[in-house]
Each structure stands twice: as C-alpha cells, then as structure tokens.
Amino acid sequence: LASYYRKFIRAFADKAHPLTALTRKSAEWKWGEEQRDVFKCIKNCLITRPVLGYPDFSREFIIYTDASGYGIGAVLAQIQLPPQSADLAESDGQDLRKSDGVEVVIAYTSKHLN
C-alpha cells in the first residue's frame, strides 16, 4: 500500500529497498531490525507533516524544476499543501543532453504530475 503513495515520499525507492528486496523471487525471507526500521520510517512519512491534502484550484500552483546532464526533477506545489515530485534519469530512455534540460523537465512534469 505504501508504494501507491510513493510519489509523495522523497527518495521512496532508497528508503524502501530493504523491504522490496524481500519480494524478489530468489530472496530469503529475513525480517530483521533493518526491515523493521525501514517500515517504521515509511509509516512515519505517511502520517506526519507534510500530509496529503486536496488541491485548491482557486489558488496558484507552483512548479519547481531542476535539470542536469544525467537527470531531471520537478515538484508541483501549492502553498500549505504537500508537494508531489517526479524524477527522470537518463537511463529511463531519454537523452537529456539533446537540450539544456529545461524543455525536457517541463514536458515531463506536465505529463506526469496531474
């Protein structure tokens, strides 16, 4: 269930790695201190500020963007509401060097943050 909300948790894949590693077909099931701590961390991310809320379409939205030679990122935010984030790495099939990154990050953000 937490994976459904992954776009609201910064670096979710890094945080959840010890848990997702348990889901591999060849993985030996081992629930230890590391897995327990990761579970608590993700649970804490879901129940503490910032918490999810409904957008207020009468208020302004803000898009923060970032681009480099190997990745792009964007955050769709609204004052007093939690941000949504989107990330794209060059390995995702895009050649980010074809432009200065600005066009790519804006196009990606408008397509994936809805």
Image (spheres, rainbow, N blue to C red):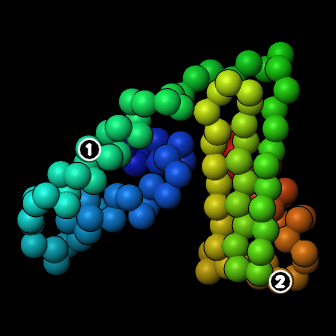
Q: Name the residue under label 2.
A: 97
Vertical placement of 61 versus 70: above or below?
A: above
Q: Residue 58 carries which label?
A: none
x, y percentage for residue 104? 83, 66
Horizontal arrangement in the rendering, residue 102 relative to residue 46 (left or right): right
Residue 89 vertical position relative to residue 108 in the rendered view, above or below? below
Disc 1 on helix, strand or loop? helix
Would you identify the image quadrant in which residue 42 lies?
A: top left
In the image: residue 17, left or right of residue 93 = left
Give the x, y percent position of residue 87. Answer: 64, 61
* Mark 2 closeness class: few <14, some 14–19, many ≥20 residues within 10 Å: few
For the N terminus, the image quarter is top left
Q: Residue at x 66, y 67 (%)?
A: 88
Would you name the residue on which mark 1 appears? 40
Q: Mark 2 is on which residue type?
A: Arg
Which quarter of the rendered picture does the C terminus lie within? top right
Seen at 62% across and 21% down, the residue is 54
Disc 1 residue type (three-letter): Lys
